[in-house]
Amino acid sequence: MSPAPGGTVVNHALTPRPVTLDLGGVTAKTWAYDATLDAPVLRAKAGDLLQVRVDNKLPTSTSVHWHGIALRNASDGVPGVTQQPIEAGSSFTYQFVAPDPGTYFFHPHTGVQLDRGLYQPLVIDDPAEPGRYDHEWIITLDDWTDGVGTSPDDILAAFKAQNGTVSSGMNHDMGGMDHGMSPLGDAGDVTYPHYLVNGRVPAAPRTLTAKPGQKVRLRVVNASSDTIFKLALQGHRLTVTHTDGFPVTPTEASAVYLAMGERLDATITLGDGVFVLQAAPEGKKGTPARAIVRTGSGSVPAPDTRIAELDGKALLTTQLKPADSARLPDRKPDITLDVALNGQMKPYAWGLNGKRFGEDTPLAVSRGQRVRLRMTNMTMMAHPMHIHGHTWALPGSDGLRKDTVLIRPMETVEADLQADNPGTWMLHCHNIYHAELGMMTTLRY
């Protein structure tokens, strides 16, 4: 393989291994790629060839999925679908050209390993980007239990033990979370001991420093496994400029929702003082994740202080409109495929079109087709649906480009893709527990 014209080769090494992380006075034995969750970010330019060697030092097999990247199928990182597992003690090198600039991340596609420390942001820079900001802050949101609460494997085993049957119709079971609190419906299944920004608990937050009046570009990744976050910066409005890597018509908001697997970019012009950047777990109890933004003097509020911006309305990324440069050329769909999201909390079971993954019928299309997926959520939970190897255009949002789309209870979302990247591609809910219980299928051509 070779880079695109003007591109270079970017070599990188990952060593997934058991580590002990300091989450800010909270110690967690877990698995991660580095000794901190605030590790250096993997960066490349659009058109570069990435060669990433993974040396697996875990006691079990693993994989790496490059979330949101329209890469070649052989490097998509799905064991049993696009590659053999990377067994304990072995290595594997991923090679792919990253075609589109944007904010992405990578994580295993193996069991519930995402619900440990195995994730990192991936930034693909645009060589033509003018910049026009003073700082860039990369913000990673996460929900945390491994090493401090019930392990992800034990959470999954308890859900599996319910041995539920996937309901193929409408289901009104609301499960066990704090319901009625969220306009998104049932927002998650697991209550976590901690919610993190850049690997830190709210009592020991990261501090981001700048000068008053400076402009900051935020790149925000929701790397959590079961939590939708509501994000805001105290005393400021965000100007959202990108979602899932692709530019949008700049849109101001006091707060934004970010579902599992979603990313957004936003700019902020900073005031003078100390401000809390806070991410509240939607529909869940627990102290919101936070970082501190300091541009001047002032004291840091107590960890459980909730900022006012989180008590108002928030922007859903599907309310954004695409920038003209991000539009998929207009074309009527050649084929429309219906995908029903099915399942319930009790007894725990999730699937697509009434079937668990492994019992499902793959979605078959042909190369060159414009494919429309009509996804209908027949459950009382919100589900972030993620497509591999492509970025959808959402006709209901004026052609907004997304690879991860939050679908609310009883909502139907249409999503178009151009079948120009042949292979076997996963379509699944990015709640890791829903996916592992069977809310996955494949799109094949």
Image: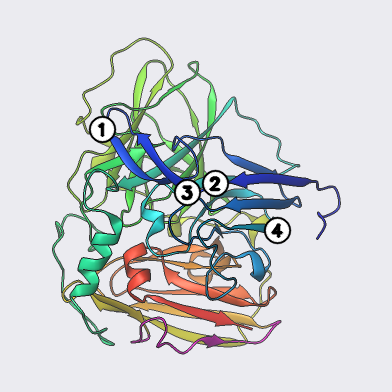
What residue is pinned by disc 4?
95
Magenta: predominant secondary structure element? loop
Q: CA distance from mark 1 to mark 4?
A: 43 Å
Q: Which residues are magenta?
A: 353-368
The kind of residue tagged 4 is Gln
182 versus 45 height, above or below: below
Q: Could you tell me residue 111's position as x and y percent?
A: 40, 65
Q: At 68% from the left edge and 73% from the top edge, which residue is drawn? A: 421
**Which mark is nearer the camera, 3 or 2?**
2
What residue is pinned by disc 2?
15
- Queried whether the magenta region covers residue 298, the answer comes back as no
The kind of residue tagged 2 is Thr
Disc nearer the start of the sequence (1/4) = 4
Q: Quadrant of residue 262?
A: bottom left
Q: CA distance from mark 3 to mark 2?
A: 12 Å
**Which mark is nearer the camera, 2 or 4?**
2
Q: CA distance from mark 2 to mark 4?
A: 16 Å
In the picture as drawn, the residue positioned furthest to the right comes out as 5
Disc nearer the start of the sequence (2/4) = 2
49 versus 292 height, above or below: below
Which of the two residues, 145 or 445, is positioned nearer the viewer here?
A: 145
308 versus 210 height, above or below: below
Element assignment for label 3: loop
**Which mark is nearer the camera, 1 or 3?**
3
- On the rendered structure, is 229 left or right of 428? left
Element assignment for label 1: loop
Residue 125 seen in this snapshot: no
- Queried whether the magenta region covers residue 354, the answer comes back as yes
276 versus 178 height, above or below: above
The kind of residue tagged 3 is Tyr
What residue is pinned by disc 3?
119
